[in-house]
Image (spheres, grey):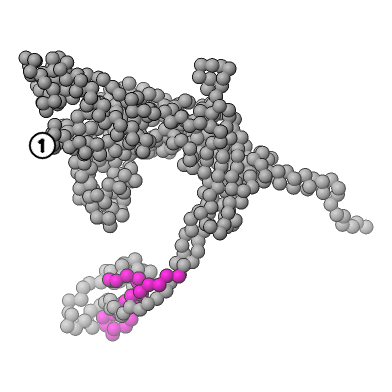
Amino acid sequence: MSRTRGPSRWTALHWLISLLVACAAIFSAVPVGFAAPAPPGPDRYKIVTLEYTAYTWLLVTFKGNHVVCKIVVDHEGRPTLEETYIDCGEKITNTWLEQKPCLTPANPNQCDGFYIYFLGSRPAKKDVPMELPEAAAWLSLQDCVPVSSLSTNVCEFVPKLLVSGQEPLSDYAITHVEGYINGRHFLCAGPTCLVDLEATSVQGAPIEFWVYSSYGDTSRRFTGTVRVSPASFGNPDDVSYFVDVLSSQWTGLPLASCAESWRVLPPVGGPPAWLSTPNDVSGLATNIPYSYLAANLIRQGVVDTRACNDRGLSPDGLTASACGLSAAREAVNAWQNRFDTLILDVARTTGVPAQLLKNLFARESQFWPGVILTGGDTGLGQITDKGADTTLLWNPSFYNQFCPLVLSGETCSSAYKDLKLAQQETLRYALVQSVNATCADCPLGIDIDRANFSVTVFAHTLTANCEQAAQVIWNYNGKKTAGDLGLTYEEMWKFTMVNYNAGGGCLASAFEEAAKNSEPLTFERISLYLSPACQGAVDYVNDISQ
């Protein structure tokens, strides 16, 4: 005869140990030996009762004046086709849409189909679901010194990663922080969690994290990459660490520009010189003898060339002669550095490398902002109509700022791609003209305020080209990000500059042809597949990157 027994001592002990392990996991970031379930995600809605005016319309048959359906809308004017479809159904709506017009208004009973009649309006209430703000989680470092000139963090010791929860609803709080770093699980009680870091590979370690709220849901599942690299700075006995965090939730020193879009970490220790932003404006200073710039300064009377037999100009008048260049040397040095402070400020605001902006202006216009070439290339960075299209299409935040300066706010509520062609053309023209500093009535023939404004425009244009280059690589490489494909940060900027100079079509064709031959994804190999019409972009990139 058998009987049911309670749990054995071993089972009870096992249960107690499991409970203690679980509790320890809650109060520390020590990894535990089980996989956490996927977070359910945010689920925040509440019903709000709104007062409004209800406008009632009737759809009535011509023959017999029978009401076939009632349409109630919350706006003045006739119902839309969609509203009619919702209240009257597909069959009636299609019949109304396709019916022939009534050509006997004096005797409408002979017509087929329906007419619409406004019955009246009345005060009404309706329940509307409203989405509430979600909980979020953010990343920062503890015990680490940021170094802005390197766009990285230099830490004396391996720091800890601080994951902080944020609950936007005042009556609720973050209860737990959870996630994985390089496959290692962490779970902490409360709104913050300190996670131990360790040295990683050059590619970094993946991290995913989320927070729990007393509201009863979790935040979204956030992801990122954390890289910790030893750095001796020439002294092997004094090791520090470069720490880079790539995530939309990172709150520390901004990572190098476009890294988040590409999902690519910059080189350990910061980007190369041509992609850097110095701490001080003196780091941008140059003294290059620009012949085209000298010729413009000579023509504007800034430079005295009476001692030159050739008036200081070459026979075509576009560049300075040797005598003119010598006479203009001081003025050329001053002019090529006059935008440096603004370039540095714009770089800090937009994240676009200051040195890249300066190199771009040097290559395109030699810092003379009034130039307009026969192809429509305009301003310091020589933007064209097609370039303006790229800026407005691929940089929505800039479009949202610029569009209301030209078109109505209602028009600009639509995305650039959804505008009418004439509206797009108007915006492109306005953007190109906004960087055209040519001014017949201004000193030196230059509207310096417009030239200054153009520095910001070109920074946003480069950001747009970052995004388009990322999309090209995604489209032609199995829908993988540049980071997934192992492309380097510097190579991605080179591809971006090809996109800026030659256009997205040139870049796309090169990747498409290279993919057919399974070429390595390096700038040197991909550039071989640029068509003859696009090959000039190679020298262009080489000039800017040196």
Name the image quarter holding the N terminus. Answer: bottom right
Identified by mark 1, the residue type is Ala
The answer to whether one can see residue 159 in this image is yes
- 230 to the left or right of 499: right
Q: Position of residue 133 (x, y in %)?
A: 48, 55
Can residue 69 be found in the magenta stretch? yes
Q: Residue furthest bottom?
A: 64
Q: Residue at x 56, y 59 (%)?
A: 171
Q: Nearer the viewer, residue 58 or 408?
A: 408
Q: Position of residue 89 (x, y in %)?
A: 37, 71
Residue holding disc 1 = 440
Task: Identify the element where label 1 is drawn.
Answer: loop
Name the image quarter holding the C terminus. Answer: top left
Q: Residue at x 16, y 20 (%)?
A: 328
Q: Residues within 10 Å of mark 1 (few under 14, many from 20)?
A: few
- Relative to 188, residue 128 above or below: below
- 7 to the left or right of 255: right
Predominant secondary structure in magenta? strand
Magenta span: 49-78
Q: How many marks?
A: 1
- Relative to 156, residue 480 above or below: below
Q: Residue furthest right?
A: 1
- 429 to the left or right of 89: left
Q: Position of residue 463 (x, y in %)?
A: 34, 37
Q: Position of residue 46 (x, y in %)?
A: 50, 64
Q: Nearer the viewer, residue 445 or 492?
A: 445
